Amino acid sequence: MFTALFPIIATPDMGRALRFYRDALDGRVIYEFSAPDGTLAYAGLEIGSSHLGIGLNPGEAGGDGRPISLWIYAEDCDAAVERLRVVGTPILQEPRDEPWGERVARVRDPDGNEIVIGQQGRGEQARPSLGASLISPEPERYMRQEYERRFLLAPGASWRELVEPYCKRFDDIYLRRTYLRVRTLTDSATGREFIKLTKKLTTRSPYVQMVGSIPLSPMEYEFIAGLAGDRLIKQRYYHFFGANVFSIDVFEGELEGLVLCEVEAGDLEELMQIELPDYIGKEVTEDSFFTGGQLCRASRSELRRKLDSIRSLRP
């Protein structure tokens, strides 16, 4: 009935906690969940072969002043709670569906510790299973490092007259409960279409990712695209500035109105020293909301709230 267990640390300062568990202890963030206002509310990390959750709590600690809770996954949250109720376990919260897509209940163990019981795979925004993080022991043998920065454009920025006359249309499907993305790329100049399957893994730095891709045939695409996933469509334009190429993405659908700019480099030092064009606005590389894996699930209202919160911080 119970399938996995790991600790969750409550913190009033997610940045401070991540600097310790991610940076100082070599943790790798494999999952993030943001509150409606865009604030990072939860992060799941791998440290070695173990998993740790960090949750935002504006108070001093977790439930009833306790800084650490235990999370345990069950095949059926409701059945698990009934089983514990029968043996006299205090029920702190009855099972309910949470915004990130899991069904969750809270109980108290015999020593007064809070135990959170979660059930995976409910709702449209079900979080990845821990099994999704299992990769080959040496991903660098099969993947390359990608050094990238990401920006919003400055308000009223004029960029269209600077870009090349051609563009590329990206139709992406982010497969749920995985780190996989299926991309159909169409070149406006030639009309040629290219399909590839990509896997991206985060590292300790938001500026560096591990990336691996393989081309797909149309038949392979039809099979994989039939799996549960979230779609993201954008037009990408290109501006050659100095020694770098700035990719400007204009999003469609729920994200209409969002324009992001990305730039890559050969290494981290080079990336941080890149000269930026005048149309570049706020950098959002460290904000996971603006990653493809998060944007594909964002609604128009969530995007509006996020952009409004960023504008409110400008001097």
Image (cartoon, grey):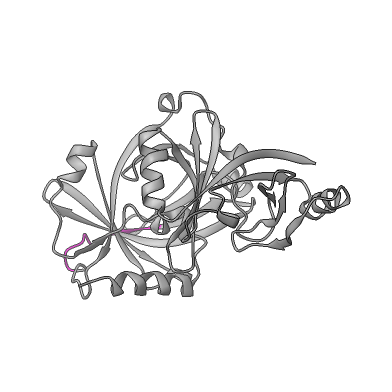
Q: Could you tell me which residue is drawn at 40 percent across and 45 percent down? A: 18
- In the picture, measured across the screen, residue 296 lies left or right of residue 176, that is left
Q: Could you tell me which residue is drawn at 57 percent across and 32 percent down? A: 134
- In the picture, measured across the screen, residue 291 lies left or right of residue 119, that is left
Location of residue 284 by image quarter: bottom left
- Percent position of residue 301, x then y: 47, 75
Q: Could you tell me which residue is drawn at 17 percent across and 68 percent down? A: 161
Q: Main secondary structure of the magenta part?
A: loop
Instruction: Please report the bounds of the magenta region as a residue range.
Output: 161-169
202 in the magenta segment: no
- Percent position of residue 287, x then y: 36, 56
Residue most extreme to the right: 86
User: Can see residue 64?
Assistant: yes
Q: Could you tell me which residue is drawn at 15 percent across and 47 percent down? A: 274
- In the picture, measured across the screen, residue 221 lies left or right of residue 152, that is right
Q: Nearer the viewer, residue 149 or 312?
A: 312
User: Can see residue 119?
Assistant: no
Q: Quadrant of the N terminus?
A: top right
165 in the magenta segment: yes
In the image, residue 309 sits, relative to residue 202, either above or below, namely below
Q: Nearer the viewer, residue 249 or 59?
A: 59
In the image, residue 34 sits, relative to residue 255, either above or below, namely above
Q: Quadrant of the C terminus?
A: bottom left
- Percent position of residue 127, x then y: 59, 51
- Percent position of residue 32, x then y: 49, 51
